[in-house]
């Protein structure tokens, strides 16, 4: 994966650190956010190569971040990482334009998905 800037939105600090540590080993610059408002502000002020949004409950709290990302950066892949698989949240995220919705993936597996999605975005 080429050097990229990623936005990570995880409300749980241990998840933010876990996924951030893996992405940092690849030389990614990360904007690590713990709230939707913080993530929206970062999207408005930074160019990003990818966005990862956590889904921790059965309500899709990342909706505003997903919508803002697609509005400002329509070609940037947005992945939703679910701690709780919920079909309604899955359908909502995918309908809004998420690139993928993964249930509790190993952070290393996220690298493969990100690489695939970023290559696809570059080809469009």
Image (cartoon, rainbow, N blue to C red):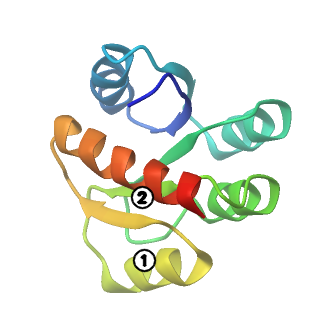
Q: Residue 119, how many percent across, how many down? A: 45, 51
Q: Position of residue 85 (x, y in %)?
A: 25, 71
**Front-lying residue, 66 or 49:** 49
Query: Which residue is identified by label 1?
Result: 89
Residue 40 image position (x, y, % from top left):
75, 44
Question: Which quadrant of the structure image shows residue 12?
Answer: top left
Q: Residue at x 39, y 78 (%)?
A: 90
Quadrant (top left/top right/bottom left/bottom right) for the C terminus = bottom right
Q: Which residue is drawn at the image coordinates 47% and 59% (left, top)?
A: 120
**Marks 2 and 1: which is nearer the front?**
2
Q: Is residue 103 left or right of residue 43?
A: left
Local crowd size for mark 1, using a 10 Å CA cut-off: few (<14), some (14–19), many (≥20): many
Where is residue 23 shown, x and y percent of the image?
Answer: 35, 24
Name the disc covering residue 113, or none: none
* Closer-to-camera residue (35/7): 7
- Give the position of the N terminus as an image quadrant: top left
Q: Which mark is residue 80?
A: 2
Secondary structure found at label 2: strand
> Within 10 angstroms of label 2, few (less than 14), some, or many (20 or more) residues?
many
Horizontal side of 104 relative to 27 (left or right) equals left
Task: Write down the quadrant of residue 50 in the picture.
Answer: top right
User: Left or right of 84: which side holds 40?
Assistant: right
Q: Given the current orientation, which residue lies at the most extreme front position?
A: 123
Q: Which residue is located at x 40 percent, y 86 percent?
A: 88
Residue 83 higher or lower than 22, as above or below: below
Q: Is residue 71 above or below residue 41?
A: below
Query: How many angstroms separate mark 2 from mark 1 (CA)?
Result: 10 Å
């Amino acid at each position: 994966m080429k050097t990229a800037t990623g936005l990570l939105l995880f409300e749980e600090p241990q998840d933010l650190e876990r996924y951030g540590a893996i992405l940092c080993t690849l030389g990614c610059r990360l904007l690590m956010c713990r709230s939707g408002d913080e993530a929206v502000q970062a999207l408005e002020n930074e160019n990003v190569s990818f966005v990862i949004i956590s889904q921790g409950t059965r309500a899709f709290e990342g909706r505003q971040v997903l919508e803002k990302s697609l509005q400002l950066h329509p070609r940037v892949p947005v992945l939703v990482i679910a701690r709780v698989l919920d079909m309604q949240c899955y359908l909502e995220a995918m309908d809004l334009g998420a690139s993928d919705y993964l249930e509790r993936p190993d952070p290393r597996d996220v690298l493969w998905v990100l690489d695939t999605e970023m290559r696809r975005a570059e080809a469009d």
